[in-house]
Image (cartoon, helix red, strand yellow):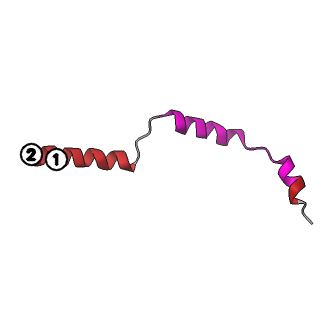
């Protein structure tokens, strides 16, 4: 049988995952919310013209 406690002790996170996490957290990435806000802002400007 698998000894889960023993396996958990051996676990080491992949360095690639940590690198990706750092890149994502340290970059200003545009997400869907940013895009929607920009579209609403542009729509308000065009309506007021």
**Residue plotted at (72% across, 43% down):** 14
Instruction: State the extent of the magenta-drawn residues as a range.
Output: 7-27
Task: From the viewer's perspective, tell me whether residue 36 is left or right of residue 5.
Answer: left
Q: Secondary structure at mark 2?
A: helix
Q: Is residue 6 above or below residue 14?
A: below
Q: Gap between marks 1 and 2, in whole Å? A: 6 Å
**Residue plotted at (86% across, 59% down):** 4
**Residue plotted at (44% across, 39% down):** 29
**Residues at discs 1 and 2 in contact (Cβ within 8 Å):** yes
What secondary structure characterizes most of the magenta part?
helix
Extreme residue toward the front, this view:
5
Instruction: Identify the disc placed on residue 20.
Output: none
What residue is disc 1 on?
A: 44
Extreme residue toward the right, this view:
1
**Residue plotted at (86% across, 54% down):** 7
Q: Is residue 11 magenta?
A: yes
Extreme residue toward the left, this view:
49
Q: Secondary structure at mark 1?
A: helix
Task: From the viewer's perspective, tell me whether residue 6 is left or right of residue 28.
Answer: right
Crowdedness near tag 2: few (<14), some (14–19) or many (≥20) residues, C-alpha within 10 Å: few
x then y, percent, for residue 38: 27, 44
Crowdedness near tag 1: few (<14), some (14–19) or many (≥20) residues, C-alpha within 10 Å: few
Quadrant that contains the N terminus: bottom right
What residue is disc 2 on?
A: 48
């Amino acid at each position: 049988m698998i000894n889960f406690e023993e396996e958990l002790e051996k676990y080491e996170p992949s360095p690639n995952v940590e690198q990706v996490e750092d890149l994502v957290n340290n970059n200003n990435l545009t997400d869907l919310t940013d895009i929607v806000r920009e579209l609403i802002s542009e729509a308000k400007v065009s309506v007021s013209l």
